[in-house]
Amino acid sequence: MLCKDLIILPVNFDKYRTASKLIHEVFRLYTDKIEPLSLDEAFLDVTECDLFSGSATLIAQDIRKKIFEKTQLAASAGIANNKMLAKIASDWRKPNGQFSVTPDEVAGFVKDLPVKKLFGVGKVTAEKLHEHNLKTCFDLQQLSLEELSIRFGKFGAQLYQMCRGIDHREVITHRERKSLSTEQTFSKDIPPNGIPLEIPKAIYKDLEDRLNRQPDLLNNIQSIFVKVKFSDFTQTTIQQSQQHIDFTSFSKLLQIRCHAQNKAIRLIGFGVHFNSSGSSVNNSQLALDLAT
């Protein structure tokens, strides 16, 4: 046994949500231009905040101080003139610090930045870039827009911008929810024909409870879907058009996917897609990214 002294505590999402609510109350003391990323992370546009003579660095310090006073949680912050740089900067001084990238520091900051730090560059994309001997933003800067587009398609244009520290994405204060799902990862892989009934029932119950707390979403379902990840880390999804949820439908979709693959199962997830209203609200450029 690798971690014989490991103690695993039960997850308490109610406590997470309470802390998140308190943190966002602090954010709203400085700006109403807030784009949540997760329970404990968000982009803030503080360009119109006149506290501390408009200094984003001092505003970030004060936000982190108030978060600790309210929740006893440490928070890190990244300060920059766009989302990508602010997000990267927020990781520089974790778990309890902050880092600023001023406009005249951008070129030097991104020069040696690993490509895996760029927005949208995951493990697979990073490996592909490394295969072309593109490991840093400086390496990417040696290629023209045309060359990057030929090698990486539409994403090449984004790489051309990002490797130069350019990110025109705006702070989105309201994002329309497109889907909602809940899933469970197993400590031991489960045989495809040996899934205990209580597991999918518990996953379904969690999804049902979350939807019942949001009637507007419950009445706006477009389709349901099941996600399965296997022991070899491949994954698959299956969905069907349906405007309501019921356990039988999810169970049938799960059986179809598990029997088709016949592999041991690592994760099961149930979820729903919502009808799109086509509306969202965009606001101006961000100046601060906070993460607790």
Image (cartoon, grey):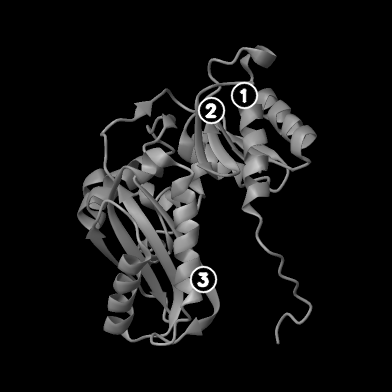
Secondary structure of the residue carrying tag 2 is loop
Q: Which amino acid does label 1 sit on?
A: Ala
Q: Residue 185 carries which label?
A: 3
Q: What residue appears at the point 69 percent right and 29 percent down from the top-left corner?
A: 63
What residue is pinned by disc 1? 56
Q: Picture coordinates of residue 229 (x, y %)?
A: 40, 73
Q: Nearer the viewer, residue 263 or 194?
A: 194
**Mark 3 crowd level (few <14, some 14–19, many ≥20, 10 Å Cα):** few
Q: Which of marks 2 and 1 is nearer the N terminus?
A: 1
> Circles 3 and 2: CB distance less than 8 Å?
no
Instruction: Give the Cα distance between marks 3 and 2.
Output: 36 Å
Along the polypeptide, which appears first: circle 1 or circle 3? 1
- Residue underneath mark 2: 287
Q: Could you classify mark 1 by the number of other residues whose Cα lies within 10 Å: few (under 14), some (14-19), or many (20 or more)? A: many
Name the residue nearer the viewer: 46 or 192: 192
* Tag 2–tag 1 contact (CB < 8 Å): yes
